[in-house]
Image (tube, grey):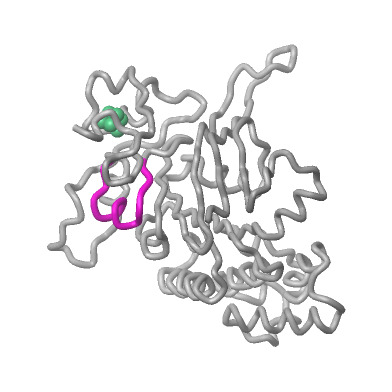
Amino acid sequence: MNLLEVQDLKVHFPVQLDWRGRPTAVVRAVDGVSLTVRSGETVGLVGESGCGKSTLGRAIVRLESLTAGSIRFEGHDLASLDAAELRAARRGLQMIFQDPYGSLDPRWTIREIVEEPMLLHGLGGDRDSRRRRVTQLLAQVGLDPAAADRYPHEFSGGQRQRIGIARALAVEPHLIVCDEVVSALDVSVQAQVVNLLASLQKEMGLAYLFIAHDLAVVEHLSHRIVVMYLGRIVEEGTSAQVCRSPVHPYTRALLSAVPSPDPGASREARVRLAGDVPSPLNPPAGCPFHPRCPMAQARCRTEVPELRPMLDGRRVACLLAEE
Ligand code: SF4
């Protein structure tokens, strides 16, 4: 069953206004994205910094206004709900952020931080029941329950991320949007947090939209992977399809950046990625990837590739995908 259905979502930011207050320049951060997340599934969302993946995650939990498109979560159209209805619907849809320190109020104890969402949603019963629930949640994410009376600055980055996970779990969500949650952590701590998320998924049937720029981390956790470039999806498929036999040159380039533990093993022909992501304020004509694409042809400068289904079920936006 689809928990989340995003249809043709656009998030545009006007950055220049004329004298009448009308936009004359627009950043198309997310430009027509459709995706689904099923119950108990992890969908990885990858791309370089500036590709729009974090804006998409924030738009899904309604921290950004939508320019167009729809978001259905557990059957509710999130765009059409009033504030009270949205708060109720959002109980099942939580988000964890890259910077756990920035997202935890430094003046609050860990108990207050984890308890707050329960109070907001009227959950957890009386004060004693909520205290017991906080103790249980901290144990569930691998923290000493004695941590409840301490403050965020007393914890390491990995521990703070565990506190963020405990806070998200406090309202028993069905889907958690994880925005670059391990990017700022050491590799060994990254693995611990990823393993924690995987075991919580098994235990509680959680679904994740796992946003990251590192395809190796995403591959480990995801059932399906969506690759974004300049606000659009360029490839989507199962984890094995995207990571073992990528079709889009951009996906192949992202994979080329992942170090292989076996130097003799060939994932795919290596594609080197030159330059940075172009500005979404002034994206290239035709295929937006053409200035960096080693396979670009003349028609790539004028024709915009649609995201098309391939015979193996994946979707790819490249003019040469079937050739
Ligand atoms: Fe490269 Fe052309 Fe495919 Fe775009 S459409 S990814 S430029 S080959």
Q: Residue at x 46, y 45 (%)?
A: 49
Kindly indicate the quadrant of the structure image that contains residue 100: bottom right
Asked if residue 82 is positioned above or below residue 204 in the image, the reply reads: above
Q: Residue at x 16, y 57 (%)?
A: 266
Asked if residue 304 is positioned above or below residue 193 in the image, the reply reads: above
* Residue 217 x, y percent position in the rendering: 39, 62
Q: Depth check: 76 or 245 in front?
A: 76
* Residue 195 x, y percent position in the rendering: 45, 74
Read off the magenta span: 235-247
Residue 224: say if magenta.
no
Q: Depth check: 270 or 86 in front?
A: 86
Quarter holding the C terminus? top left
Q: Residue furthest right?
A: 126
Q: Residue at x 63, y 31 (%)?
A: 67
Kindly indicate the quadrant of the structure image that contains residue 26: top right
* Residue 44 x, y percent position in the rendering: 44, 54
Kindly indicate the quadrant of the structure image that contains residue 275: top left
Query: Relative to 180, is 152 on the left or the right?
Result: right
Q: Can the viewer see residue 219 in this picture?
A: yes
Q: Residue furthest left?
A: 264
> Which of the four quarters of the rendered structure image does ligand 1 lie in?
top left
Query: Relative to 250, is 213 on the left or the right?
Result: right
Residue 236: say if magenta.
yes
Q: Residue furthest top?
A: 19
* Residue 88 x, y percent position in the rendering: 76, 55
Q: Residue at x 63, y 26 (%)?
A: 15
Looking at the image, how many numbered discs can be counted on the residues?
A: 0
Q: Residue furthest front?
A: 1
Query: Relative to 180, is 305 on the left or the right?
Result: left
Query: Relative to 117, is 230 on the left or the right?
Result: left
Q: Depth check: 254 or 40 in front?
A: 40
